[in-house]
Amino acid sequence: MNGVRLLARSSSGTHKYDLDKEEIVIGRDKSCDVSLEEATVSRKHARIAKDVDGYRIEDLGSTAGTYVNEKRVEQAALAAGDRIAIGEVEIMFYPAGPGLAEPTLILPIGTQPERSVTAAVATQGAALMVIKGDDRNRVLNLSADELPIGRDETCAIYVNDRYMSRRHAKISKRGAGYALTDLGSSNGTFLNGRLVKEAKLTPGDEIKLGSTVFRFQVEGKESLFRGLSGRLELFLLLDLLQLLNIAGRTGRLHLSRDGGEAGELFFEKGEIVDARIAGQVGVDAALALFAWDAGDFRFESDAFVPAQKTIASPADLMERALRLVERGRRH
């Protein structure tokens, strides 16, 4: 990828823009590089421009204002994973470069960037994935020896969870491993459902702080995908499809309902190329699976992908998936 990647979520769905330009204008006008049809977006709302230090965003006198990580700005420097609000449209910003070489795990829309934690998952090391909570799908690289977690914005891992204490817990590096320590929180720190004051962490452990649940992983982004499984009630299908699509993953997504019904979506470099459910194949099978909002899912990155593709236009199918699931969220 050259230039920048913008992921925009609005009432019309979620869209990806790959733009290799020194200057990008965002607005409601059709002549803009990123044209947004939302009424809350000004005709020429904001501009992203490259300078010697990277990229900056500038508000162009918009009515609703331009926000970066929930702060209104006239001008601001941008970093990978920054969240931009343009009217009622939410945009995630990712520049090209060594830190985002393809294939890279890109954080989905709705995540929040870190202050001392990188926005992209490193190729080696430990990481947390939020599997339940408002920051669902957020991936955190544990790059420091000690990382406090809490509702206080000074925490290395800041989570806006009203049930979490200001400084709730910390994760510390201990030799070749990691430990979880409660910092005197009001609601306690839970590891795999058990209340703990301090405990050693192992890959796959689930940590509950307030109403937020994290999964602890080691070895970087590949282990996150090997361990990518759970319930659709907690990990919405829209986010799951985006995660696999934008990260360019190849493999099989197995879906099953509690009554025994099962289906499969096959991905090749992030695109859905085949789908199967109860005798159906291709687009019809995929659309049937997109309607599921409950059950188990499991992604297998080393699974066999059929050589014969039953879906001729994966990009169009993904757009339909995003629209269908987004519509379901609003009802």
Image (cartoon, rainbow, N blue to C red):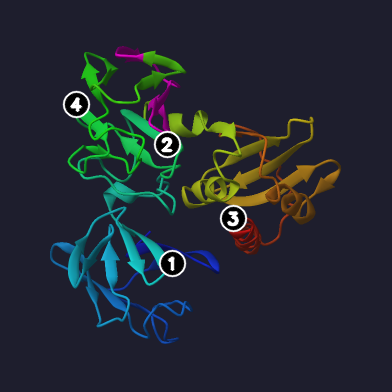
Q: For the point 45% across and 76% down, which residue is it?
A: 36
To which quarter of the image does residue 19 belong? Answer: bottom left
Residue type at mark 3?
Arg
* Extreme residue toward the front, this view: 186
- Which amino acid type is shown beneath numbered disc 4? Glu
Q: Which amino acid does label 1 sit on?
A: Tyr
The x and y percentages for residue 52 are: 13, 66
Q: Name the residue under label 2.
A: 130
SS of the residue under disc 3: helix
> Where is mark 3, residue-wise?
329
Q: Residue at x 41, y 77 (%)?
A: 40
| Magenta stretch bounds | 196-217
Q: Position of residue 17 (x, y in %)?
A: 43, 67
Does the residue at mark 1 contact the one at mark 4 (Cβ under 8 Å)? no
Other-residue count near label 2 (Cα within 10 Å), few / some / many at <14 / 14–19 / ≥20: many
Q: Position of residue 176 (x, y in %)?
A: 26, 15
| Label located before the other in sequence (1 or 4) | 1
189 or 287, nearer to the observer: 189
* Element type at mark 1: strand
Residue 194 pos. (x, y %): 43, 14
Residue with the mark numbered 4: 146
Q: Which of these two is toward me, 150 or 92?
A: 150
Image: 96 above or below 120: below
Q: Distance between the residues labelled 2 and 1?
A: 25 Å
Q: Quadrant of the N terminus?
A: bottom left
Above or below, 13 against 221 in this view is: below
Q: Which of marks 3 and 1 is in front?
A: 3
Q: Does 228 sit left or right of 134 as displayed?
A: right
- The CA span between labels 2 and 4 is 19 Å
Question: Which of pointers 2 and 1 lies earlier in the amino acid sequence?
Answer: 1
- The tag earlier along the polypeptide, 3 or 2, is 2
Which label sits on residue 17? Answer: 1
